[in-house]
Structure formats: structure tokens, C-alpha cells
């Protein structure tokens, strides 16, 4: 708030009123919001984390379904049908979306990875930041490949 007040030269009364003069309507400073988009990712973090966590089950279900259909077609019990193509596409699309949401979490939204990347040497000493900054990221990257 201090930087905002200094850059916009507000009076002390306006500073106490949250950045506006008495009787002035509250306005959103769009230019400042566009310059500093980190607040969007920080507010979006819990929602993105839940989405990322739920989507893993879609990825897993699509993978199991595609493997089951492929094995039943390979064993000759049922002919391989368009279901294999459908489940394969659902799996690939879900995996891609999961990967992109993970990248958003890793590079912007997650306070754990932001803190770990700011001081990686110190983060490697502790389990949770090391897990999310290095181990989980490397293993999931290999899973996508």
C-alpha cells in the first residue's frame, strides 16, 4: 500500500481511507492490475490445486480404461473398437491439461515452489519443498514423456 500511495501521491486522509479521497468512489486501477498479475495466481492457487488434484483421477481412469480396452482387443475376447481411440484421446487430453495446470502451480501459483525456487539450496534440506520443487516435478515430467 505504501508504494501505491507514494506513486499516486495521495493525501494522508486518502491513505487512511484505502487510497481514495473522502466522498470519492472506489475504483480499480486497471493499469496497476495488469502490471502486477501475481495476485491473480495467488488467489487462484486453492482452486487450481483442487482442479489439479481431481484431474489426476480422470487421467488415471482414462489410462486404466484405455489399457483395459487395448488388452481385451489384443487377447481376442472383444474386437478393438472406436472405444480404444476415445479413451486414448481422453487420456492424452486429460494428461496435457494436468501437465499445464501443474506448470501453472509450479511457476506461479504455489507458495511452496515459489519459496523453494527463491532459495533452492535451503529448500533441498527440507522434505516438503524438496518434494514439490524437485522430486514430484521430475517424476511427473517423466510420466508425461
Image: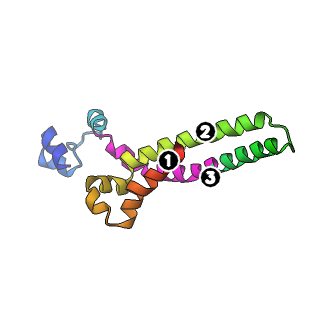
Q: Residues within 10 Å of mark 2 (few under 14, many from 20)?
A: some
What residue sits right under mark 3 in the picture?
57
Gap in angstroms between the C-alphas marked 1 and 3 = 18 Å
Q: Residues within 10 Å of mark 1 (few under 14, many from 20)?
A: few
What residue sits right under mark 2 in the picture?
92
* Residue 47 visible at all: no
Numbered label attached to residue 60: none
What residue sits right under mark 1 in the picture?
142
Residue ranking furthest to the bottom: 126
Secondary structure beneath dot 2 equals: helix
The residue nearer to you, when weighing 34 against 111, is 111
On the image, the x and y values in percent for residue 65 come to 72, 47
Q: Nearer the viewer, mark 2 or mark 1?
A: 1
The residue nearer to you, when weighing 143 against 1, is 143
Gap in angstroms between the C-alphas marked 2 and 1 = 15 Å
* Residue 124 visible at all: yes
Marks 1,3: beta carbons within 8 A: no
In magenta stretch: residue 43 = yes
What's the magenta region? 36-59
Q: Residue at x 28, y 56 (%)?
A: 120
Above or below, comparing residue 128 to residue 97 in the picture: below
Left or right position of 139 against 92: left
On the image, the x and y values in percent for residue 110 come to 39, 52
Prevailing secondary structure of the magenta residues: helix
Q: Nearer the viewer, mark 1 or mark 3?
A: 1
Secondary structure beneath dot 1 equals: helix
Gap in angstroms between the C-alphas marked 3 and 2 = 13 Å
Label 3 vs 2, first from the N-terminus: 3
Q: Residue at x 36, y 61 (%)?
A: 129
Amino acid at each position: 500500500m505504501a508504494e501505491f500511495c507514494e506513486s499516486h501521491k495521495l493525501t494522508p486522509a486518502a491513505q487512511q481511507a484505502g487510497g481514495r479521497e473522502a466522498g470519492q468512489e472506489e475504483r480499480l486501477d486497471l493499469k496497476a492490475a495488469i502490471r502486477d498479475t501475481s495476485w491473480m495466481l495467488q488467489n487462484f492457487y486453492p482452486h487450481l490445486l483442487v482442479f489439479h488434484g481431481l484431474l489426476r483421477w480422470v487421467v488415471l481412469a482414462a489410462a486404466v480404461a484405455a489399457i483395459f480396452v487395448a488388452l481385451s482387443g489384443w487377447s481376442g475376447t472383444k474386437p478393438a473398437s472406436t472405444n480404444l481411440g476415445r479413451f486414448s484421446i481422453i487420456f492424452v487430453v486429460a494428461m496435457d491439461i494436468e501437465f499445464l495446470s501443474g506448470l501453472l502451480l509450479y511457476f506461479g501459483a504455489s507458495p511452496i515452489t515459489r519459496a523453494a525456487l527463491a532459495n533452492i539450496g535451503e529448500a533441498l534440506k527440507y522434505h516438503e519443498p524438496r518434494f514439490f520443487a524437485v522430486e514430484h516435478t521430475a517424476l511427473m515430467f517423466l510420466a508425461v514423456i
